[in-house]
Image (tube, rainbow, N blue to C red):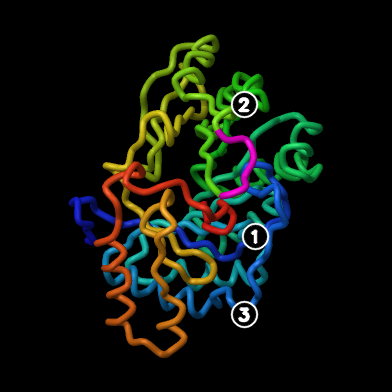
């Protein structure tokens, strides 16, 4: 298994397949005009498979596909079918905004996708349109139902909590877990990306979120599939779970097990650092597996001990692959 300079076991690669998105979420976009990558700069599926094979041979076990919005990239289902058959892969998941999920959930499951995370910051149609830039809440809710119906498990809901924007819906979102086998994860707002709005004033700590939810009942610690950074709880008798991701108030860098691959082939050791290593150039120059492996190993050597040793990244989340 891969280990970094601080002894952390690295077995998880987040792969962004596109920087395009069909939403314009305020915390993921910029106040300025966002420039998309030229199509020729984005790694092809064949190139992604080659790089992922290298990672798997080194000790990567888990792959999460991200964007932008991964479901808008043509050919994704066929790519997942090929990816799911790679030797050494133990877990294949996807993060999506859910807009296209209802029509694709069955095909994704059949292709080999195991589980899915769906972004959902509000249950109010007017607020969703304002926060996400599109009136697609009904499509997302239908996508959640479809994911549950076809057997993707677990289905996790990612809610970025923003003070003064959606913090008055915490209880409503948590109630989703009472009747459905969902894992609703409340994520502290992270000021990622130069020019992104709502910085410090949007922060709402997980401690206060948890205090608010105690009004619904006692939260009992439990576990979750995926072994990620969320601290997981459940209400008595609930079918689902509640998670808290304390990205800002209580960092979990000492347990970080991941690397990130951007859509244009940059390998990022840390979300909170703009340090990137280029995999695309050697790949397109015909590099052998050994040379590509060395880029992965170099990323491990450069991975900082914590985000406090890095800095807030200039790149927006949609161009990194959250």
Q: Which mark is residue 40?
A: 3
Q: Earlier in the sequence, mark 3 or mark 1?
A: 3
Instruction: Please tell me whether mark 3 sits on a helix, a strand or a loop.
Output: helix
- Measured in 3D between alpha carbons, the distance from the residue under mark 1 to the one under mark 2, in whole angstroms, is 24 Å
The quadrant of the rendering that contains the N terminus is bottom left
- Measured in 3D between alpha carbons, the distance from the residue under mark 3 to the one under mark 2, in whole angstroms, is 40 Å
* Disc nearest the viewer among 3 and 1: 3
Q: Is 279 rendered above or below residue 149?
A: below
Q: Is residue 103 visible?
A: no
User: x%, y% of residue 263?
Assistant: 54, 67
Identified at 72% across, 49% down, the residue is: 24
Q: Earlier in the sequence, mark 3 or mark 2?
A: 3
Number of other residues with Cα within 10 Å of mark 1, as a class: few under 14, some 14 to 19, many 20 or more: many
Check disc 2 and report the residue beneath it. 173
Identify the magenta region: 194-199
Instruction: Please tell me whether mark 1 sits on a helix, a strand or a loop.
Output: helix
- Left or right of residue 145, residue 133 in this image: right
Q: Answer yes or no: do the residues labelled 1 and 2 have beta carbons within 8 Å?
A: no
Q: Earlier in the sequence, mark 1 or mark 2?
A: 1
Check disc 1 and report the residue beneath it. 71
Identified at 52% across, 27% down, the residue is: 239
């Amino acid at each position: 298994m891969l280990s970094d300079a601080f002894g952390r076991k690295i077995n998880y690669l987040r792969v962004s397949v596109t920087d395009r998105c069909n939403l314009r979420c305020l915390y993921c976009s910029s106040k300025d005009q966002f420039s998309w990558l030229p199509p020729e700069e984005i790694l092809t599926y064949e190139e992604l498979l080659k790089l992922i094979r290298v990672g798997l041979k080194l000790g990567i076990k888990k792959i999460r596909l991200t964007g932008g919005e991964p479901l808008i990239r043509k050919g994704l289902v066929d790519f997942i079918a090929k990816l799911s058959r790679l030797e050494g892969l133990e877990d294949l998941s996807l993060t999506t905004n859910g807009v296209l999920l209802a029509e694709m959930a069955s095909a994704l499951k059949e292709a080999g996708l195991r589980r899915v995370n769906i972004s959902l910051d509000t249950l109010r149609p007017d607020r969703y349109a304002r926060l996400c830039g599109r009136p697609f809440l009904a499509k997302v809710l239908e996508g959640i139902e479809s994911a549950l119906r076809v057997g993707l498990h677990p289905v996790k809901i990612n809610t970025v909590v923003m003070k003064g924007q959606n913090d008055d819906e915490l209880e409503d979102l948590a109630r989703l877990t009472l009747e459905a086998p969902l894992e609703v994860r409340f994520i502290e707002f992270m000021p990622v990306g130069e020019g992104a709005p709502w910085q410090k004033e949007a922060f709402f700590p997980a401690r206060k979120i948890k205090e608010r939810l105690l009004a619904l009942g006692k939260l009992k610690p439990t576990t979750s599939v995926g072994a990620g950074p969320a601290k997981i709880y459940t209400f008595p008798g609930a079918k689902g779970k509640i998670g808290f991701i304390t990205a800002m108030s209580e960092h979990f860098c000492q347990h970080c097990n991941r690397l990130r691959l951007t859509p244009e082939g940059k390998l990022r050791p840390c979300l909170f650092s703009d340090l990137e290593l280029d995999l695309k150039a050697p790949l397109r120059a015909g590099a052998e597996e050994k040379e590509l492996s060395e880029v992965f190993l170099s990323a491990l050597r450069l991975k900082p001990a914590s985000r406090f040793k890095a800095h807030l990244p200039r790149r927006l989340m949609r161009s990194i692959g959250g």
